[in-house]
Amino acid sequence: MSACTLALIGAGSRGDEAYGRLVESGAVDAAFAAVAEPDAGRRSSFAARHGIPASRCFADWRDLLSAGRLADGLLVCSPDGAHFEQARSGLGLGYGVLLEKPMSNDPAECLTLGDLARERGGVFMICHVLRYSPFFGALKERLDSGEIGELMAIDHCENIGYWHFAHSFVRGNWRSAAGGSPLVLAKSSHDMDILLWLAGRDCSRVASFGSLSYFGEARAPRGSGTRCATDCGIESSCAYSARAIYMRSRGSWPSNVISVGQGIEDIEKAISEGPYGRCVFRCDNDVVDHQSTVLEFEGGVTAAFSLSAFTGRISRTIKLMGSEGEIRGDMEKNEIEIARHGSSRRRMIYPGGASGSHGGGDLGLLRDFVRAVATGDSSLARTRAEDSVQGHLMAFAAEESRKAKLVVDLRAYEAGLRARARAR
Ligand SMILES: NC(=O)c1ccc[n+]([C@@H]2O[C@H](COP(=O)([O-])OP(=O)(O)OC[C@H]3O[C@@H](n4cnc5c(N)ncnc54)[C@H](O)[C@@H]3O)[C@@H](O)[C@H]2O)c1
């Protein structure tokens, strides 16, 4: 018998391929007891693999939640715009809730969820998987040990990778800020959370710059068409060829996002007919393709954070600058270098256990959630909802700053949101 039973809303890439597979592999002491997923193929495939009876499989999440509490914990892994209502309803039923980031794509709703978490107690965690990765865990440990003295500044880059950017933010689900979340929230709420965690103090001011400079019709190369598989004359030499991206990842992410079937014909069909076969210069995307944000924390610690589509590798690279030394890290290489000022010696650390998605972060997070739900001890959680709100506000404030060309005072920003919510 498992320590904890789980209900899942949204059996997609995160719900099924990340958390579902971890439970299936036995790495986490839990079992799925119910699922809500609108896509019939995904729903039945998930239910069959987890042995969930038909009476506990739902096309509509409202039916799952109106059936009462069917499990100990609820995983909310649906698209961003659905998170708020689903998490709030789940908390109301007494579920321990694990909510995918972002908490909501509305900053006022993030505040409401944080307030609810504080008022209700219980287990309510956000999927900020990076806090659980051995890489960031080791960085935080070295920083807190005082090895580089007092932290002065952070330089952090999220290198999204050109083909990953094309998949998710040009052709895919996160391509529109108007219909969803701005890039700095969708992709980088994790990074804001990590910066807040590393700085170890509240963020006071935010300024940000960025634009959509490349992925639009004005940059379409001569000879390109509307779809890679049908009318493009340069497909074989294009870095963004859908055929190249999805054929080489057949059987895994991101290919498994565009088609349940993973045969060659399934992928050909998906790129011939579906959204993921569109030319990257002729999509309906509006999110920025690069953005730089400057943050000030209390006590004068500063951080510069860049996110960009225009990188070959998918990685996070970071430099922590202290009064007595410097720590440099590359998450993809799982490599940390520590140098003390005045010494030519370099100490290298290769954090252990860094296997699996998000450098092992998915596994650590799900294990903690299951442990917290099974024991009822929310203090076991490293990513409590009430602590995650500020990182989200930093991302919203960055977008506000970018659009309005202003420096945003975070405390005043939060006060404004609360005042507007009261006036409604
Ligand atoms: N923690 C992380 O590192 C991380 C990484 C990627 C995505 N995410 C977040 O996870 C969430 C899911 O992303 P994904 O990549 O799994 O997307 P996905 O599209 O692969 O999966 C979402 C699933 O939800 C289903 N769905 C759609 N509308 C629904 C609704 N109203 N109720 C219930 N289910 C619904 C879809 O059919 C799909 O199967 C998003 O909020 C995303 O921002 C988090």
Image: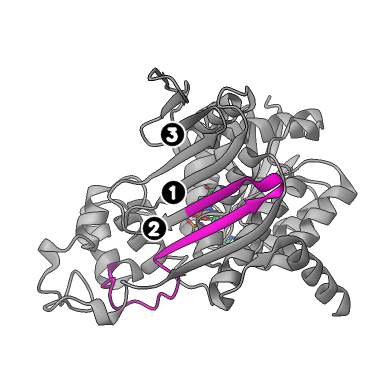
Q: Residue at x 11, y 62 (%)?
A: 237
Quadrant of the rendering where the C terminus is positioned: bottom right
Asked if the magenta segment contains residue 330, the reply would be no
Secondary structure under tag 3 reads strand
> Please, what is the three-letter code of the amino acid marked with disc 3?
Gly
* Spatial CA span between label 3 and label 1: 11 Å
What's drawn in magenta, residue-wise? 277-305
Q: Is residue 127 visible?
A: no
Q: Mark 3 — residue?
A: 329
Secondary structure under tag 1 reads strand
Q: Quadrant of residue 383?
A: top right
Q: Mark 1 — residue?
A: 157
Q: Mark 2 — residue?
A: 308
Badge 3 crowding class, 10 Å Cα cut-off, few under 14, some 14 to 19, many 20 or more, is many
Dot placed on the residue nearer the N-terminal end, 1 or 2 = 1
Compared with 68, 290 (above or below) is below
Q: Residue at x 59, y 70 (%)?
A: 401
* Spatial CA span between label 3 and label 2: 18 Å
Q: Are the residues at dot 1 and dot 2 in contact (C-beta closer than 8 Å)?
A: yes
Asked if the magenta segment contains residue 289, the reply would be yes
Dot placed on the residue nearer the N-terminal end, 3 or 1 = 1
